[in-house]
Image: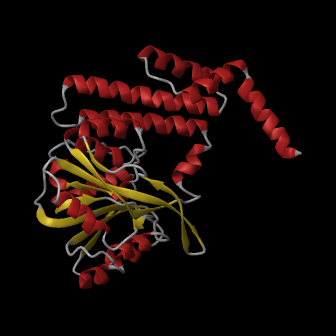
Amino acid sequence: MICPSINKGLVSILTPCYNASLYISYLMESILKQDYPSIEMIVINDGSTDGTESLVNSFVERFKSRGYALRIIHQENAGQSSAINNGLKYVTGEFLVWPDSDDYFATSNAISMMVKAFENSNKNIGLVRVHEALIKRTNENDEIIGIYGQGLSGFEYSKKIFKECLLQENGFYYTPGGFMIKTEYLFNSTKSIFTDKLTGQNAQLLFPILYHYDCYTIPEIYYHVLVRPDSHSRSIAGNFNKCIQLFDAYEETNRQTIENIINISQDDLVYYESLNKSNYDLKRLAVSCQFNKLKNAKIYYRRLKESKFKIPSSILIRYIFLQLGILQLVRYVNKFKNKI
């Protein structure tokens, strides 16, 4: 990828959105409250049909009076990764954050504290992340129901964090608004963005950075993640075929992203692609047990055994119970109890 002209000290906020008119104003207001002086926001309207574009445009003058730049780019609906790929062409900031349209910054110093962490750290820091609170909204009130990043703090090494990111282990979280990266490092670390409509942008922005650079975690809550009952992930969770389809798409996106990392060694390429495949076979095994799909479960279990990938005991027990017919019996008993 060709690195754009970089404005030193400028923070670029890049947000893809689709039918976000009910939520995006929270994000916009939280940006206007920031104490950091130099911000540009680029909103990629991914074919919204609900007035999102008009709502964002209504903030242009307020951003201007605050000394911030705001622009909205329209594209036909093509998904988040496509929107991010499109938006990167307009980014000019030294630093980049990419919050979701329905989340928002929790404090007025969120941006400035992330920039400060970069300024006070060595040049090999490519990612700064913060703790993020999961928010449940009722009657306009926000209640914290969980925290991403709890227990994570301080300096970590990139190769270790890259594996954690790939496997989403040791408390690694993917919600993007609490991450800030150096724009130049991103463009110097990846060849391109894979724009499959089924998958998102987070792994594609994080993998190249975390393979080559270090991560610094600020152990403070600076970002709020809205938990929505109508979210896309919740609708998929109840359908076996959709889960498998999504896992297939995620696995392929990760594979493409690993291959796109600039200067990745051949040994690492083979190793991480194998880990990626096994990790999604593990997810497929788990969801096969969840939906009582024994034939599918046997296939994924055999693959995992052949690759010598460790199967957690909780999933292994569910697989054994599925083979014995115990899972189906337990579900039947629970269903019967609920009717009494």
At 42% from the left edge and 58% from the top edge, which residue is drawn? 132
Residue found 15% across the figure and 33% down from its top: 263
Nearest to the observer: residue 82 or residue 250 = 250
Determine the image quadrant of residue 158. top left
Between 114 and 191, which is closer to the camera in this rendering? 114
Residue 142 percent across, percent down from the top left: 53, 70
Is 325 situated above or below 27?
A: above
Residue 92 picture location, percent across and down: 16, 63
Give coordinates of residue 191: x percent, y percent.
19, 41
Residue 136 as seen in the image, left or right of residue 121: right
User: For this rendering, which residue is in front, 173 or 155?
Assistant: 155
Establish if 145 lies above or below 323. below
Is residue 154 left or right of 189 when viewed as pictured?
Answer: right
Quarter holding residue 164: top left
**The C terminus sits in image quarter:** top right
Q: Residue furthest top?
A: 306
Q: Residue at x 86, y 45 (%)?
A: 339
Q: Tag count in the figure?
A: 0
Q: Can residue 94 be seen in this view?
A: yes
